[in-house]
Amino acid sequence: MQTKRTIFPNKVLPYFLLAPQLVITGIFFFWPAGQAIWQSFLREDAFGFKTTFVWLANYTALFEDPNYLNSLQVTLVFSVCVAALSLGLALLLAVCVDRLIKGASGYTTLLLWPYAVAPAIAGVLWWFLFNPTIGILPFIMERLGYNWDHALNSTDAMILVVVAASWKQISYNFIFFLAGLQSIPLSLREAAAIDGAGPFKRFFTITLPLLSPTSFFLMVVNVVYAMFDTFGIIHATTEGGPAQSTNILVYKVYADGFIGLNLGSSAAQSVILMGIVILLTFVQFRYVERRVAY
Amino acid sequence: MATRHLMASLIAAVAMAGTSTAAFAATEITWWHAMGGELGAKLEAIATKYNESQSDYKVVPVFKGTYPETLTAAIAAFRAGQQPHIVQVFEVGTGTMMAAKGAVYPVYQLMKDAGEPFDPKAFLPSVVGYYTDTEGNMLSMPFNSSTPVLYYNKTVFEKAGLDPNTPPKTWEEMESFSKKIMDSGAAKCGFTTGWVSWVQTENLSAWHNQQIGTLENGFGGLKTELTYNNPLVAKHWANLKKWQDAGIFQYGGKGGGNDAPPKFYSQECAMYMNSSASRAGVLANSKDFQVGVAMLPHYADVKPQNSIIGGATLWVLQGKKDAEYKGVADFFSYLSSAEVQADWHQGTGYLPITQASYELSQKQGYYDKNPGADVSIKQITLNEPTANSKGLRFGSYVQIRDIIDEEFQQVLSGAKTSEVALGDLVKRGNALLREFEAANAN
């Protein structure tokens, strides 16, 4: 096939057209990122009177700090739990809706609503539901013999933030899974059904592998979501507690920098986070482009 | 010709009018504060009254959120050259502000430069002591100071067969009274508390005359080291764990303890320790029962010393015009007058921070009409403050407070004994103090 290429003789115009985007990227991404990197090599008092260049001292201090290592571990547990729970439930809901003949659009609309809720509001909602003093769920759990207390019990606190964060993300995953499911030709499943494969067999051998590009994409998106977009949820529910058991990396950046006024360490932590995002983006582009499975 | 003359004089008149209004426009003074709700309204009223009382200056109060948020905002603003004239900083931020010598215009200096009469002796010693440097100079303007007291439910006391006019004096009585209340079914739990860090650790130590940091609890310099791991705090935290297991004590959460007030208001817990400035809230939420106010309990084998303050002071930031600082000084004189202070004290439950305002409140018969309102001031002035009960001054103290909460939670959840938790608290806190020392050393 022959392609026709249009050549624009003007050499300046393309840069001119790109300029707005470049300016925005420069001001809002490269400049702050550069400042964070510079700041991460400094030790400074809160007001900025005394600045000492300390090379990598902020970084080495971080990796010697058991709280930072704990925060890494907490972030890992949290992101894996949120990704697994929200992907699992979203897939279940999507499969159910996919089988519906009537009213599918109604369900879809309802299931999408939580996505429109701001993280802080979601946090407050779940905080109310699980509040040990006034919440309805601890009241019921006490009847069932479980003493819920996320203010003291690390596991309870982790469950609370995982549930709140997953709840919000299910909608997003659901809509992608539903679209993915609907793009799988019905004939494949019919053929398998005629060959005698039951619904579970059909799901695991046909539907799931064919969904894998969607699943992989969502996995990366969910991990990024759990690591970065859940600040509001943590802030509104546990504030990283009890005893740092829900102090994820993003929250620690805020707590150390804005509450503790330790700007050097906070900057070093955000540079590390930036590295993680770059890595995740790389993985995403490299493998999703190649398409998983088939 | 005539019209031209007229025009010229008109222009001149307009120009004159312009300059004269500029000359009469009041100099604006920005005041960043952290008082929300009722307290915020009261604070706004003070500013409005001041603005009405004279025409040279106009104080503009701006609410900036919580105490830590206000402090962070002020620091960020200072770095950007957009700082307010006055900022309200809570007591745990004192170490940070004092170390920032180039950012702060010390109040004693400000008053001297502006020629305003200013006598530090007019203030309560326990308040002044907290905010003076080692030479005895006052660095910030005391504004809202409080101290923790014990609130108790008289109605529940009566139901449990206790004398509603005899609150528990000692921790031993706290335990036995609580048991009696719970056994009689008058309430589900004995007591709860706000601010585990401030009430059950710092004030507990001062009240029992125990040191919590070397170099006079940090007043002596940046080289201070924490000594929270004293036998008293260890015993007390262990007791709180024991009492929690027995249902006598219920934990109200970290920081200020947001879950504590509802436990007391709903009559689930019969007693509640919190700031004297919680008084307005307690009275507003205790419509179904009678409330009594008492001093903090102490262990029977120790004579109580005096409690320490919390709350905030007003710091003046550098980098403004002299004329504006004159206004700040004038406003501070107004603010510390007996009438304004007495009004603020009576309306909020904060301490009357000058002797004159305390005497004025007495003269007005406020304490006769409001029994219990003077418990806080009696408690804070019970004895001449010692090196252990003057207060505390540590850098990075906002974070250390968080560590106190975290370690206390570990004790309550049974993950650590109180000795181990306090040992870890001291270790983690000292690391922050050394970091602060390195960042602020000259």
Image (tube, rainbow, N blue to C red):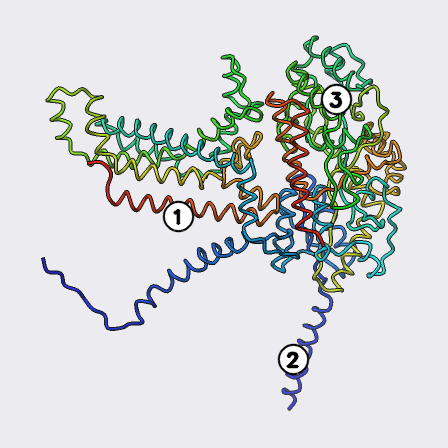
Identified by mark 2, the residue type is Ile
- Judge left or right: residue A170 versus residue A274: left
Task: Return the mark for residue B11.
Answer: 2
Under tag 2, what secondary structure?
Answer: helix
Specify the quadrant that holds the N terminus of chain A: bottom left
| Residue pointed to by mark 3 | B152
Front in this rendered view, residue A201 or B5: A201
| Residue pointed to by mark 1 | A278
A48 lies above or below A289: below
* Marks 2 and 1 close (CB-CB < 8 Å): no
Front in this rendered view, residue B291 or B257: B257
Comparing labels 3 and 1, the label whose residue is closer to the camera: 1
Label 1: how many Cα within 10 Å (few below 14, some 14–19, many 20+): few
Residue B183 can be seen in this image: yes
Comparing labels 2 and 1, the label whose residue is closer to the camera: 1
Identified by mark 1, the residue type is Ile
Comparing labels 2 and 3, the label whose residue is closer to the camera: 3
Label 2 vs label 1: CA separation?
65 Å
Front in this rendered view, residue A101 or A141: A141
Label 3: how many Cα within 10 Å (few below 14, some 14–19, many 20+): many
Q: Residue furthest top?
A: B184
Q: Chain of mark 1?
A: A
Identified by mark 3, the residue type is Tyr
Q: Quadrant of residue B399?
A: top right
Residue B275 can be seen in this image: no
Q: Quadrant of residue A153?
A: top right
Specify the quadrant that holds the C terminus of chain A: top left
